[in-house]
Image: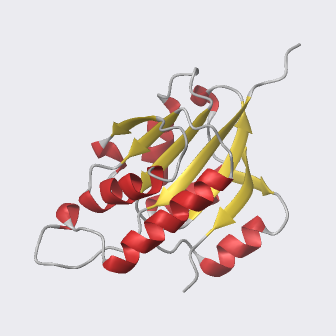
Amino acid sequence: MSVPESRRIVLFRHAKADWPQVTDHERPLAERGRMDAAEAGRRLADTDIPFDLALCSTAIRTRETWKLAVHEFQHRPKTVYEERVYEASPGELIALLNETPDDAQNVLLIGHNPGVQGLADVLSGSADGDARERMSRRGFPAAAFAVLSFGGSWKTLEPGVATLLDYWAPSE
Protein backbone atom coordinates (compact mmCIF):
# COMPACT_ATOMS: atom_id res chain seq x y z
CA MET A 1 0.00 0.00 0.00
CA SER A 2 1.50 3.34 -1.01
CA VAL A 3 1.26 6.56 0.93
CA PRO A 4 -0.43 9.38 -1.05
CA GLU A 5 1.98 12.06 -2.22
CA SER A 6 1.84 15.25 -0.21
CA ARG A 7 0.98 18.31 -2.29
CA ARG A 8 1.04 21.94 -1.31
CA ILE A 9 -1.26 24.75 -2.35
CA VAL A 10 -0.52 28.37 -1.56
CA LEU A 11 -3.52 30.67 -1.77
CA PHE A 12 -2.30 34.21 -2.35
CA ARG A 13 -4.58 37.24 -2.42
CA HIS A 14 -3.54 40.10 -4.70
CA ALA A 15 -1.94 43.11 -3.05
CA LYS A 16 -3.74 46.40 -2.34
CA ALA A 17 -5.30 47.84 -5.47
CA ASP A 18 -5.94 51.42 -6.47
CA TRP A 19 -9.40 52.76 -7.41
CA PRO A 20 -8.98 54.74 -10.66
CA GLN A 21 -11.88 55.22 -13.08
CA VAL A 22 -11.46 51.85 -14.82
CA THR A 23 -13.38 48.56 -14.73
CA ASP A 24 -12.76 46.33 -11.71
CA HIS A 25 -10.79 43.88 -13.87
CA GLU A 26 -8.44 46.68 -14.97
CA ARG A 27 -7.64 48.10 -11.51
CA PRO A 28 -3.86 48.40 -10.94
CA LEU A 29 -1.96 48.08 -7.68
CA ALA A 30 -1.64 51.03 -5.34
CA GLU A 31 1.86 52.09 -4.23
CA ARG A 32 1.40 50.22 -0.94
CA GLY A 33 0.30 47.18 -2.93
CA ARG A 34 3.53 47.19 -4.92
CA MET A 35 5.56 47.20 -1.70
CA ASP A 36 3.43 44.47 -0.07
CA ALA A 37 3.57 42.27 -3.20
CA ALA A 38 7.38 42.34 -3.14
CA GLU A 39 7.41 41.58 0.61
CA ALA A 40 4.97 38.69 0.10
CA GLY A 41 7.27 37.40 -2.64
CA ARG A 42 10.21 37.43 -0.23
CA ARG A 43 8.11 35.59 2.38
CA LEU A 44 6.97 33.03 -0.20
CA ALA A 45 10.58 32.52 -1.34
CA ASP A 46 11.53 31.93 2.32
CA THR A 47 9.13 28.97 2.48
CA ASP A 48 11.51 27.09 0.13
CA ILE A 49 8.49 25.53 -1.60
CA PRO A 50 9.56 24.60 -5.15
CA PHE A 51 6.46 25.75 -7.00
CA ASP A 52 5.69 23.84 -10.18
CA LEU A 53 2.74 25.93 -11.29
CA ALA A 54 1.21 29.34 -10.62
CA LEU A 55 -2.44 29.92 -11.52
CA CYS A 56 -3.06 33.65 -11.69
CA SER A 57 -6.26 35.60 -12.30
CA THR A 58 -6.22 37.69 -15.46
CA ALA A 59 -7.09 40.88 -13.53
CA ILE A 60 -4.41 43.60 -13.73
CA ARG A 61 -3.90 43.73 -9.94
CA THR A 62 -3.25 39.97 -9.67
CA ARG A 63 -0.88 40.01 -12.65
CA GLU A 64 1.05 42.93 -11.13
CA THR A 65 1.11 41.22 -7.72
CA TRP A 66 2.51 38.05 -9.26
CA LYS A 67 5.11 39.90 -11.35
CA LEU A 68 6.46 41.67 -8.25
CA ALA A 69 6.30 38.57 -6.02
CA VAL A 70 7.89 36.08 -8.45
CA HIS A 71 10.82 38.47 -8.94
CA GLU A 72 11.90 37.37 -5.44
CA PHE A 73 11.97 33.64 -6.35
CA GLN A 74 15.10 31.76 -7.39
CA HIS A 75 13.06 29.53 -9.72
CA ARG A 76 10.11 30.90 -11.67
CA PRO A 77 7.32 28.30 -11.94
CA LYS A 78 5.23 27.83 -15.05
CA THR A 79 2.54 30.52 -14.93
CA VAL A 80 -0.97 30.17 -16.34
CA TYR A 81 -3.15 33.27 -16.45
CA GLU A 82 -6.61 31.86 -15.86
CA GLU A 83 -9.72 34.01 -16.27
CA ARG A 84 -11.77 31.53 -14.22
CA VAL A 85 -9.90 32.65 -11.06
CA TYR A 86 -11.41 36.15 -11.33
CA GLU A 87 -14.56 36.40 -9.13
CA ALA A 88 -14.48 32.63 -8.50
CA SER A 89 -16.22 31.01 -5.56
CA PRO A 90 -14.40 28.43 -3.42
CA GLY A 91 -16.23 25.64 -5.27
CA GLU A 92 -15.20 27.03 -8.66
CA LEU A 93 -11.58 27.28 -7.46
CA ILE A 94 -11.66 23.65 -6.26
CA ALA A 95 -13.00 22.58 -9.66
CA LEU A 96 -10.15 24.47 -11.34
CA LEU A 97 -7.54 22.92 -9.03
CA ASN A 98 -9.06 19.46 -9.72
CA GLU A 99 -7.90 19.96 -13.35
CA THR A 100 -4.26 20.39 -12.29
CA PRO A 101 -1.95 17.74 -13.81
CA ASP A 102 -0.58 15.38 -11.17
CA ASP A 103 3.01 16.11 -12.17
CA ALA A 104 2.52 19.50 -10.45
CA GLN A 105 3.43 18.92 -6.82
CA ASN A 106 3.19 22.49 -5.49
CA VAL A 107 0.74 25.06 -6.83
CA LEU A 108 0.38 28.77 -6.13
CA LEU A 109 -3.00 30.37 -6.83
CA ILE A 110 -3.07 34.18 -7.05
CA GLY A 111 -6.64 35.42 -6.76
CA HIS A 112 -9.24 37.53 -5.06
CA ASN A 113 -11.43 37.67 -1.99
CA PRO A 114 -13.86 36.40 -0.95
CA GLY A 115 -12.92 33.31 -3.01
CA VAL A 116 -9.35 32.89 -1.75
CA GLN A 117 -10.22 33.23 1.93
CA GLY A 118 -13.26 31.03 1.49
CA LEU A 119 -11.15 28.38 -0.20
CA ALA A 120 -8.58 28.43 2.62
CA ASP A 121 -11.38 28.00 5.17
CA VAL A 122 -13.17 25.25 3.19
CA LEU A 123 -10.08 23.17 2.40
CA SER A 124 -8.43 23.25 5.83
CA GLY A 125 -9.83 20.41 7.88
CA SER A 126 -6.95 20.82 10.34
CA ALA A 127 -4.16 23.29 11.08
CA ASP A 128 -0.63 23.34 12.44
CA GLY A 129 0.17 25.50 15.44
CA ASP A 130 -1.66 28.81 15.57
CA ALA A 131 -2.08 29.23 11.79
CA ARG A 132 -5.89 28.97 11.88
CA GLU A 133 -6.19 31.35 14.82
CA ARG A 134 -3.96 33.93 13.09
CA MET A 135 -5.93 33.61 9.85
CA SER A 136 -9.24 33.92 11.69
CA ARG A 137 -8.04 36.96 13.62
CA ARG A 138 -6.55 38.81 10.62
CA GLY A 139 -8.94 37.66 7.90
CA PHE A 140 -7.36 37.63 4.48
CA PRO A 141 -6.13 41.17 3.79
CA ALA A 142 -4.51 42.19 0.51
CA ALA A 143 -1.19 40.35 -0.12
CA ALA A 144 -1.92 37.65 2.50
CA PHE A 145 -1.24 34.00 1.75
CA ALA A 146 -2.06 30.60 3.27
CA VAL A 147 0.01 27.44 2.82
CA LEU A 148 -1.95 24.17 2.79
CA SER A 149 -1.02 20.53 2.19
CA PHE A 150 -3.00 17.44 1.31
CA GLY A 151 -2.33 13.88 0.18
CA GLY A 152 -3.49 12.37 -3.09
CA SER A 153 -4.09 13.55 -6.62
CA TRP A 154 -5.47 16.95 -7.56
CA LYS A 155 -8.71 15.24 -8.58
CA THR A 156 -9.24 14.26 -4.91
CA LEU A 157 -8.97 17.82 -3.59
CA GLU A 158 -12.21 18.62 -1.77
CA PRO A 159 -13.44 20.44 1.35
CA GLY A 160 -11.72 19.44 4.57
CA VAL A 161 -8.87 17.34 3.12
CA ALA A 162 -6.04 19.83 3.64
CA THR A 163 -3.97 20.97 6.59
CA LEU A 164 -3.33 24.68 7.00
CA LEU A 165 0.44 24.77 7.53
CA ASP A 166 1.10 28.49 7.62
CA TYR A 167 -0.46 31.89 7.13
CA TRP A 168 1.13 35.28 6.50
CA ALA A 169 -0.26 38.78 6.06
CA PRO A 170 1.54 42.12 5.77
CA SER A 171 1.50 44.33 8.84
CA GLU A 172 -1.04 47.07 8.82
Position above or below: 104 against 97: above
Res 55 visible? yes
| Percent position of residue 155, x then y | 57, 27
Q: Quadrant of the C terminus?
A: bottom right
Give the residue displayed 38% in from the left and 73% down from the top.
33
Residue closer to the observer: 75 or 65: 75
Position above or below: 72 against 27: above
Q: Residue furthest right?
A: 1
Give the residue displayed 50% in from the left and 28% down from the top.
100
| Percent position of residue 45, x then y | 60, 52
Residue closer to the observer: 61 or 156: 61
Asked if residue 81 lies left or right of residue 104, the reply is left
Q: Quadrant of the N terminus?
A: top right
Res 89 visible? no
| Percent position of residue 69, x then y | 46, 56
Q: Residue furthest left?
A: 21
Give the residue displayed 49% in from the left and 35% down from the top.
53
Q: Which quadrant would residue 149 be assigned to in this image?
A: top right
Position above or below: 138 against 3: below
Asked if residue 10 lies left or right of residue 66, the reply is right
Give the residue displayed 72% in from the left and 59% down from the top.
166
Position above or below: 70 against 143: above
